[in-house]
Amino acid sequence: MIDFVIYVVGTVMLAIWLMIPAYISNPMAVVFGGGTPIDMGMKWIDKQRILGDGKTIRGLVGGTACGIVAGLIQIYAASAFDNPIVPIPPLTAVITLSFGALLGDLIKSFFKRRIGFVRGAELPLIDQLDFVAGAWLLTYIFDPVWFTEHFISSPSIIVTVLVLTPVLHRLTNIFGYNIKLKKEPW
Ligand code: CTP
Ligand code: MG
């Protein structure tokens, strides 16, 4: 029993560690968000906004930058700690996890607008996992070896991230809503 608890706690901690750049860039886009929207107010052929006012240049740049800074701190800390149970993320993965997360969120908004969901409308599960999909896909494209080693060959990490992320996302957004940073608690 105790072995199982240690295994679960260890897996959850490793999953969070591997996802930190994405877990930081996504909420930081909310903190830095505002100002000029990425689509510059332009509309698609369906006369709806391409992305909407919820996707801004400041959010994208500020969020990505914060995720990268968090990843650089991880590289520094893990190098100093120098223990194989704490993997050192490669710089490429730090960048693709941070930027990929917000790219996934942006692509989701594009499709949300196409199916007629206004900015801020809730799409359960997709709103919570869009950034994971983006982070994973971009990381797989740019560093398939690292991604395969830490994610594809560890299905327990994949499952943990898929289960844990909606919970963490929800808690973060309720917090963001309460401190009036976010318009909706999802
Ligand atoms: N945000 C931003 N730029 C981004 C992503 C997010 O400025 N690239 C900010 C916006 O202020 C946005 C808030 O973070 O309103 C919450 O993000 P999200 O829930 O992803 O956007 P929504 O407003 O819900 O819009 P959508 O319906 O397109 O998801
Ligand atoms: Mg939203």
Image: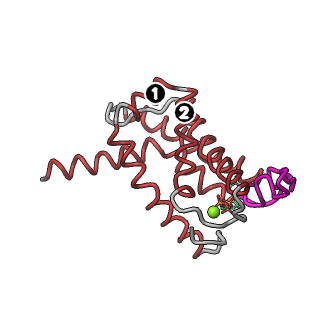
Overall secondary structure of the magenta section:
loop
- Which quarter shows the C terminus? bottom right
Which residue position is annotated with label 1? 146
Q: Is 45 one of the magenta-colored residues?
A: yes
Q: Is residue 169 above or below residue 130?
A: below
Q: Position of residue 168 (x, y in %)?
A: 46, 60
For mark 2, does the 10 Å Cα neighbourhood hold few (<14), some (14 to 19), or many (20 or more) residues?
many
Which residue position is annotated with label 2? 139
Q: Which residues are magenta?
A: 33-56
Residue furthest left as drawn: 1
Q: Quadrant of residue 11?
A: top left
Assign ligand 2 to one image quadrant. Answer: bottom right
Residue found at x 57% / y 28%: 141
Residue found at x 68% / y 49%: 106
Marks 1/2 in contact by CB < 8 Å: the verdict is: yes
Q: Is residue 98 above or below residue 111?
A: above
Mark 1 to mark 2: distance in Å?
8 Å
Q: Position of residue 128 (x, y in %)?
A: 53, 57
Q: Is 47 one of the magenta-colored residues?
A: yes
Q: Secondary structure at mark 2?
A: helix
Going by the numbered disc 1, the residue's amino acid type is Trp
